[in-house]
Image (tube, coloured by chain):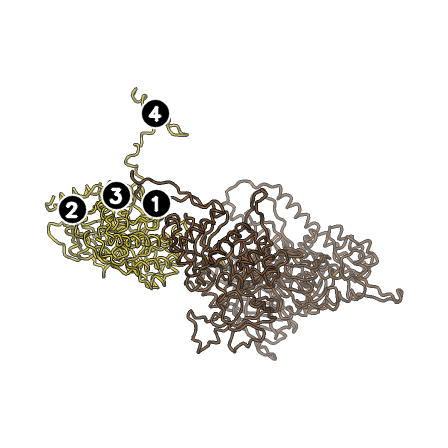
Amino acid sequence: MTTTMTRATYAATYAMTLCAAFLHFAPNASASDGRLAIRVGRIITNNGPDIENGTIYIEGGRIQSVGTDAGRWDAEVIDHPELVAFPGWVEAHSIRGMDRPNENIEVAPFLDVRDSIDPINFYFEDCLRQGVLAINVQQGSFCAIGGQGRVVKPFGLTIEDMTLRPSSGIKVVATRPGRSRALQVQALRRAFRDLRDHLEKLVVDKKDGKDSARREELFQGRDPDKEENKKGRPMEGDAPWKVKNFETVPRGEVDEKQSPLLRLVEGKMMAFVACDGAVSVVQALEIARENGFLANTVLVVEGDAWKAADRIAEAGVPVVLAPQLLYTERDPMTGKEIETFVPGVFREKKVRFALQSLNPSAQSLWFQAATCVGYGIPRDEAIAAATKVPADILRLGERLGTIEKGKDGNILLLSGDPLAVTTSVEYVVLDGNLVYDRSKDVRVQQVLEGLEQPNAAPAGADEASDVDPHGGSTKEGDTKSKTDKKKD
Amino acid sequence: MGVHLLVALAATLTVSTAPTPAPSAQPVAGGTVAIRAGSVHAVAGGRIIENGIVLVRDGKIVAVGADVVVPPGARVVDYGPDAVLTPGLVAADSNYGAPRPDERTADPFLRAADNFDPYDSYVFALEAGVTTAYLAPARNRLVAGVGAVVKLAGDTDAEARMLRDPAAIHGSIGLDARSAPGYWRPPVPATADVGLGVVKPELPRSLAGAVVAFRELFALAQGSKAAPAADEYGDGVGEELRRLMGERVPWRITADSAPEIRALLELFGKNGQPFVVDGANDAADVADELAAAGASVILDAPIAPNRPGQDRGKDEDTRWPRYDAAVKLAAVGVRFAIAPPRTGSASDLRLAAQLMSRGGLDPEIGLRAITLSAAEILGVADHVGSLAPGKDADLAVFTGHPLSGGAVMATWVGGELAFDADDLASAGAYPEARESAPAHTTNLVIQVDELHLGDGNVLSPGEVLVIGGKIRAVGRSVGRPGGARVVHGAAAMPGMIDALGHLGLEGSQKIPATRFDMTRLVEPGDRVDRRVAKAGVTTVVLSPRGPSRTGAPMMAYKPAGEDLDAMIVDSPCALRFTWTDRNRRESGAALVDRLRKAADYAKKWAEYQAKLATWTPPKTEADAEAKDGEKGDDAEVKEGEKEGDGEAKEADKKDDEKKDKKKKKGEEEPAKPITGAWESKLTLPPFQEARVRLYVLDEDGAVSGSLRCASLADGLIQVTGKRDGHKVELSGEGSRGLVQLSGETKDGKLKAKLTVAGTSASADFEQTATEYEVAKPSEQRRPKDVKKPEIKGEPKAPGIDPELEPLRRAMDGEAAIVVEVNREDEILACVDAFEAVGIRPVLYGAEEAWKVVDKIEGRVAGVLLLHDIVRASPETGALKRNRYAELSAAGIPIAFHSDAEEGAIDVPLMATYAVSQGLGAEAALRALTSGAAHMLAISDRVGTIAPGMDADILLLDGSPLSPSSSVVRVWVAGREVR
């Protein structure tokens, strides 16, 4: 459908979308090029001063104007002077929303989280409810190299619908529970050593005139005659080690299991490196330096990693903080408790940091940002740590994080201040489509008003059935009641 | 060690050790530390320097010796003449690298250094004097990985802490390595064509197999044609081994049994690679072969501390633990180190060395095995292991020789204090002790040749462990918990007791009422009091200078107590009566009357308690009784003072009315009680300006307390009076006459006029405290239930009579009654009268007690004789009579008392004199300590050296029974009196 959206069709789409919010029907295709004007009491642009009583005009999924311009006359209008418009929160790293994540294959740079993201996972529904509009899903927390992540929107029927940025980065795990640090570091070193060995072997084989790599290329389904596969290039990137004469090898002949790691080493892929402590940080940075991907590294830090904040600042990499913002330890001598507010440390050391939710429904990004404010971080910086900074880290700074012209039409309509506990997300507009309406959110209503589950048995059903009060109904009882009913 | 701790240490040390070494052209005196100890074991060259100094600058040792010139401005740390200073201990093995093997049987890629966490705290190792440790990469593999040697304190930069990496190719030829599980890695992807594969068994399984495997690995490393396929041991293993061997990294191979050790000697004897035999439990059997091969050995003590017993197997050839390796190796000249047990922690290093010393290892060789030898074998002797100029300033300070039970006092790493036992003792070691003990109490072990427990027993040698101001353990040898200071001496005994003294009365002749709280008289921190304690009299039973009709209160207190709680042992601990009346016919009548009253009173309480015990409270609603409860409380208080009952109520009412009125006016702030301390300056001609301190308790307008001012009296003036709203009237008897104070409180200040002997002056008091701590009732005898809301049918508490209460306590044996009585017949009458109410009195004076010893024996708590210890009389001729000795011999407890203030210091001399005149020395000692304590019912806290008692201990330079011995050091509640 390419017709302009009238109020009637909007209303239909609106109703349909609302119903769909929890069943994840795809929004009406017409919405993608629909025109939408959102008129609210306050626009928090997150990029300059707030605008009172302003209008956001979205067309073709992008914000066309922010201010007083109402856009085209035939645009649909959402008019809520009591609400506050806010850009969506951005989750820089998440291990949720997956059906079967890879946690088995130790070194798996070739795996893509595309294969495990589950669009109907409740996680995404919760993200909408909490106003998290972009999520970087990364698998493989218990691997050495877990696979490629993906930045998705929390709405869409297919993964392609949801995708904001495929191959957002490779998950690298510097320490993992139940395994010694040395073994893990050794596994990582081995992975890069294997890459190097593979590439060197390709060069030697090419020199020796062996064609096994080409045959493997065909077997793996790549087209050797395709221009990009045919060409050989010298190895790029900052890695201190270089494979000589690598330009002699057509790029298509690099094994598909190794090529994502090569992209990482050449600086064309991000690395999300999970570190559970200060030592891991030091080791992760060392491995990144040794293999030339320090510039495209993001550290996902936990525990006492903040103790290595100096090293992180020196390396100039951004960090994604663990949901637990307070670090508690005991003085080894006196046994006294010492608390450290982790974001405060990173802020002081001038390290760019992004926040992470604890789980879909508790300590979501707004709460984390509010906690930061509570501990003395300036409000704009706290909000940025859950909007602009993660957007930049995910290389989506051009599209997300603020309400300004040219960015994605993602708007939260909030009942109040974004950091207030009493505020709720009333509406969510994603790419110019209204995808969430709290008043129609059945699950919220169930929680707040104690409504029945839609597919639960009706209220009176129990009276008729012959339920054993001690242990549920027996089969015999069931049949009995059925027969009784028939008699009636 | 955590960053914060380092920062804290650096701050306390004020040693400015910059991360980068200061330029040598400008030596900073502030960065120089001179560490002094009674004996310094340099280890290198076996040097032991008495009263040595280690001079440290910028984390390095500059000089070691007895005659080192300490540069001006250097900080001097003196650990005292008993301290033993050694190099920081080197743990030749440790689990700090969290050793966990990889799947493959040979994995030289696994680096222990990767497991080192410089952000972690190694406080337990430092606490044991260990400053350097080898990190095992893994165990239980032929080649488990590459070891590293690190320092356990210092920078958070791992590289700065790394002494050597790679330090060894760590492996094992032992049984543990010959049982590696199978190896399997699933293919990715596994398809119909590519199977999942099977688990590949990993070799070797036998010792011969292990030898073959090592040969194969060597061949692989040399790239020789005899080498097996590379993938047999994993990709790149050969190259990595070649690289390591090229750097001449030694092989460190665990071999416990003699065949294993022989196999190693043969393997490495052939290929010439440097190697170290690790474990070597049976090294004694192959000592000569090891010596011939010039091998180095790291001995592993076969113990598993902190674990249950281990079954090792019942077969003939099962190897059971042996501890004889070190002695044998030392005898044949093999270089060896002793490592902490593999199954323990690095902090067990000294224990391991002590165990391995069995069979008569020289302690100096033992020390070398955990310092220099270990450092040499690990290849870090250029930095650590001995005290020599140029080496790192890693030191450990012990209270005795580290291999003969000395405890760690301090550990230094890189010239900075990394562990201080004092911090541990005061900070975290014993939380329960921390609460009860005054701050900075050191855990203490007093080790003496003769320990007199006070009850007549002597331990020789003996030790006392003091924790948190209390005696924790007593014995010939007690534990030495972390942070305990050890003090050596010739003899020790409990602090002595002055059974009846006046220290604290400040010359007062007043005899206070029974209900008077004696704790008001004393304040901690008095200089004279401390001197008395320093002389050995740690407890004084303070008595007024005479008895009273209702019983003068006596209080047991410690003159050197640090605070009021530590100071007061019991108050009142006794009542002092006199039996004798001027009119002898009336003798005892008043006291007998009082005892009868006390008996009635005690009976009431006993009845009440019996009723209460059988009464079960009805179940009622709690809220209805809240108000009743308050009433009940009031009633009960008043019952104690029945006479003033009605008046008090009226007064209360008036008070209430007044309060109400004031509230209605709403202008003035309500009058507050003036309880607490008030201070001011006072100029009263002809005296100079003097400080006035008023310390009072205000109970609903009834004010009592003390006033101290040099211009008004020499000592404390007991003042009483009242407060009516804001108006305060107080008066008391000072040494210059009646002192009157009248004033008004306003805005938290007290404007008052003080009058003494006709002259007056004004003073503006400022409140310095709002609490009147000394006025706390000394003993709450109320059963806890009394405070609960009154419930119908609940037995009513009889109320506490402060005059009779001590008598009641005496009947329970919780307090003492001192009765002044001299004549034989009166003594008997007195003892009879007290026996009737179940009290064993302490007879004071008791001139003729010796005549009736057989009649009063067992019926009196003791006798306090007057000070003429020996008496000569015409009847006895030249024979002098020692009454103390006679009574003591008859089994009647005696004690010594001063009847003076600071004259309490003469009490020990009295005992010495009594001994010289025939009193048994042991009996004298008992009379000074436990005898007096038992007699005065304070033996639950003082008088003996026993677990749970207050740590009031005297250290003497000779036997306490010898007149030539003197008190050298004194501890009161675990704190030394200085």
Q: Position of residue B345 (x, y in %)?
A: 51, 54
Q: Which residue was labeled with disc 2?
A: A31
User: Which mark is in front, 4 or 1?
Assistant: 1
Q: Chain of mark 2?
A: A
What is the C-alpha distance between the residues marked 1 and 3?
Answer: 22 Å
The answer to which of marks 1 and 2 sits earlier in the sequence is 2
Q: Position of residue A399 (x, y in %)?
A: 21, 55
- The answer to whether marks 4 and 2 sit on the same chain is yes
What is the C-alpha distance between the residues marked 4 and 1?
Answer: 45 Å
User: Which mark is in front, 1 or 2?
Assistant: 1
Q: Which residue was labeled with disc 3?
A: A119
- The answer to whether marks 3 and 2 sit on the same chain is yes
Q: Position of residue B547 (x, y in %)?
A: 72, 62
Q: Which residue was labeled with disc 1?
A: A104
Q: Position of residue B553 (x, y in %)?
A: 68, 60
Q: Which residue was labeled with disc 4?
A: A478
Residue B25 visible from this viewpoint: yes
Letter of the chain shown yellow in the rendering: A
Residue B143 placement, left or right of B760: left
Name the element at disc 1: loop
The answer to whether marks 1 and 2 mark residues whose Cβ atoms lie closer than 8 Å is no
The answer to which of marks 4 and 1 sits earlier in the sequence is 1
The answer to whether marks 1 and 3 mark residues whose Cβ atoms lie closer than 8 Å is no
The answer to which of marks 4 and 2 sits earlier in the sequence is 2
What residue is rendered at 14% in x and 48% in y? Answer: A34
Q: Chain of mark 3?
A: A
Q: Amino acid at mark 4?
A: Asp
Name the element at disc 4: helix
User: Which mark is in front, 3 or 2?
Assistant: 3
Letter of the chain shown brown in the rendering: B
The answer to which of marks 1 and 3 sits earlier in the sequence is 1
Q: Residue furthest front?
A: B225
